[in-house]
Amino acid sequence: MPRTNGYRGVSRDAAQKHYDVSDEFFQIWLGPSLAYAGGLWEDGADTLEKAQLRKTDYLLGQAGIRPGHRVLDVGCGYGAEMQRMVEEYDADSVTGITLSEAAVEWTRNLAIPRTEIRLENWIDHRPAQPYDAIICVEAMEHFARPGMSGRAKTRGYREFFSRCRSWLRPEGRLVIQTITWGHRFPWDLDLLRGLYLASKVYPECNPSYLTELQAASDGLFDLVALRNDFDHYARTLRCWLENLDADRDRAAQLVGEKKARDFERCMTTAVRAFSEGWLHLHRLTFRPVPEPVGPARRFLVNNVLARDSLPTPKFLG
């Protein structure tokens, strides 16, 4: 198994600085499911809870979860996907891992049968048996820190893909929902200020580019489904902002005026970033390749196999 070159992704302290604030504060704007991720929307009359449930069912459907399956949820949040897998999909065993103590306590208190939640970094995970499916909902944003080169980020992502492949059954699926960088950002001071603030609210967080994920998974997984729903995230964020505004005084009482305002400003900036395509929301479905190999040697494909580069077979001459 490849080494991590010393970098283990977001630290537990950084993760807890953001997530271990106040469950009640997050409930105010995330809603009762505490689904902290972009929803999957349909018509104009849709609701936040319906969009979140549709997102969950889409991801679990892509993962092919069926009765009797063993599933790993990387970055499991407050357990909404875990609960759905057991109650509606009849999964036999669901393991969730997170770096948030608050999420661990919340999910354990739900007492969901056939589940286990661990305060654990994915790098330290050692499954007792292979999984039928792995899902990872908006956790990869924490697998790289600001300032890392694209090459270093890709090495870290490849470590994750390599481990996931070793944890999966040959017919298993890996499903990821993640925020990614989109187009180049304009030189707009308001947007840049908002991004700087986000780096403080979400410490040690740096999304990937889609190309980095494709390079990292090359030779380990085939990408079999891909969609980009950045406009869905903008709509989700607008709902969160409306919820926060509707109970703004209580939110400030729970976490303080500055923190409530910082969350509000970050989400306002994110609405614009997703609406204009500067940030994307990718949902990806991977299946393991039969035998893992190194990344494709594109020189061979692009050059050596060119028609004029090879001798013509005698029967074609």
Image (tube, grey):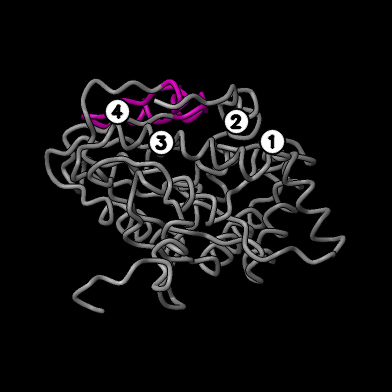
Q: Which residue is mark 3?
A: 74
Q: Residues within 10 Å of mark 1 (few under 14, many from 20)?
A: many
Q: Are marks 4 and 1 in contact (CB under 8 Å)?
A: no
Let me know if residue 113 is in the magenta part: yes
Question: In the rendering, at what x and y percent does residue 209 appear?
Answer: 58, 54
Q: Amino acid at mark 1?
A: Pro
Residue 211 appears in view: yes
Task: Measure how far apart labels 3 and 1 are at the Cα level.
Answer: 19 Å
Is residue 127 shown left or right of residue 5?
Answer: left
Q: Amino acid at mark 2?
A: Val
Q: Is the residue 312 above or below the residue 40 in the image?
A: below
Q: Tag 1 or tag 3, which sits nearer the N-term? A: 3
Quadrant where the C terminus is found in the figure: bottom left
Is residue 131 shown left or right of residue 44?
Answer: left
- Give SS at disc 2: loop
Quadrant where the N terminus is found in the figure: top left
Q: Which residue is mark 4?
A: 111
- Give SS at disc 1: loop
Q: Are marks 4 and 3 in contact (CB under 8 Å)?
A: no
Q: Which residues are magenta?
A: 98-124
Q: Which residue is mark 2?
A: 10
Q: Tag 2 or tag 1, which sits nearer the N-term? A: 2
Residue drawn at x 30%, y 25% is 116
Q: Are marks 1 and 2 in contact (CB under 8 Å)?
A: yes
Q: Which residue is mark 1?
A: 203
- Give SS at disc 4: loop
Residue drawn at x 33%, y 20% is 126
- Relative to the observer, which residue lies in front, 182 or 136? 182
Task: Measure how far apart labels 4 and 1 are at the Cα level.
Answer: 31 Å
